[in-house]
Amino acid sequence: MTFKSLLALLVPAALAACATPGPYAEVTGDRVSVADPTEESVRIVGVNGKLDLSSPSTVTIDPGRNMLLVRTTRKDGRKMSPDAMLPLNAKPCTRYYVIAKHESQLRVEPWSLEIKKVEPIGECLAKYPGGVAPK
């Protein structure tokens, strides 16, 4: 596959993944606290069935029901942990901090997802008071 054909496939996919104009929500997988060794950052592998090859730590999503495919950043030698699904009914102008909660501070598995912190997005609320798009 040539670079041009790869680019032709990826650009429309990237544009389709962008949130629609109006209030938005954000999910970040950056660790909130380094004090707990059982917590680890996550990468968002996909949103609503669309995979993102770059696996960013932060994504912007539309408010409402979303399904995120998430991967822990912790590695255990050659072993990769399975990805996890996170159903999220996102509120407008809200940021969600998601972490991987591991049962052991040394092993990858088992682990679960946890919404560690939720906060309003100030610039979104300033643009869309009450989290509502102007008509």
Image (cartoon, rainbow, N blue to C red):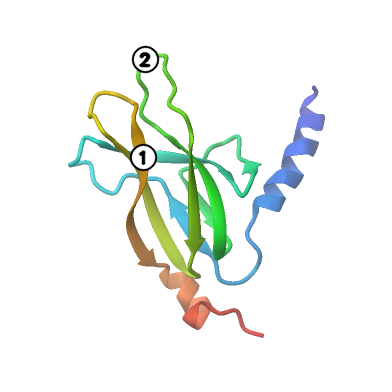
Task: State which quadrant residue 61 falls in.
Answer: bottom right
Kindly identify the residue that appears in the image at 23 percent across and 29 percent down.
104
Name the disc covering residue 76, or none.
none
Q: Nearer the viewer, mark 1 or mark 2?
A: 1
Residue 71 horizontal/vertical position (percent): 46, 35
Earlier in the chain: of badge 1 and badge 2, it is: 2
- Binning the other alpha carbons within 10 Å of mark 1 as few (below 14), some (14 to 19) or many (20 upward) gives some
Q: Residue at x 50, y 62 (%)?
A: 89
- Residue 55 in the image, given as x and y percentages of width and height: 53, 38
Number of residues whose C-alpha sits closer than 10 Å to that of mark 2, classed few (under 14), some (14–19) or many (20 or more): few
Element class at badge 1: strand
User: How many tags in the picture?
Assistant: 2
Horizontal side of residue 130 vs 11, given as left or right: left
- SS for callout 2: loop
Q: Are dots 1 and 2 in contact, CB under 8 Å?
A: no
Residue 34 to residue 65: above or below: above
**Quadrant including the N terminus:** top right
Q: Quadrant of residue 100?
A: top left
Q: Residue at x 50, y 70 (%)?
A: 92
Mark 1: which amino acid? Ser
Q: Which residue is mark 1?
A: 112
Residue type, label 2:
Gly
Name the residue carrying label 2. 77
Residue plotted at (61% across, 72% down): 22
Horizontal and vertical percent position of residue 19: 63, 60
| 11 to the left or right of 21 | right
Which corner quadrant holds the C terminus? bottom right
In depth, the one of 14 and 105 nearer the eye is: 105
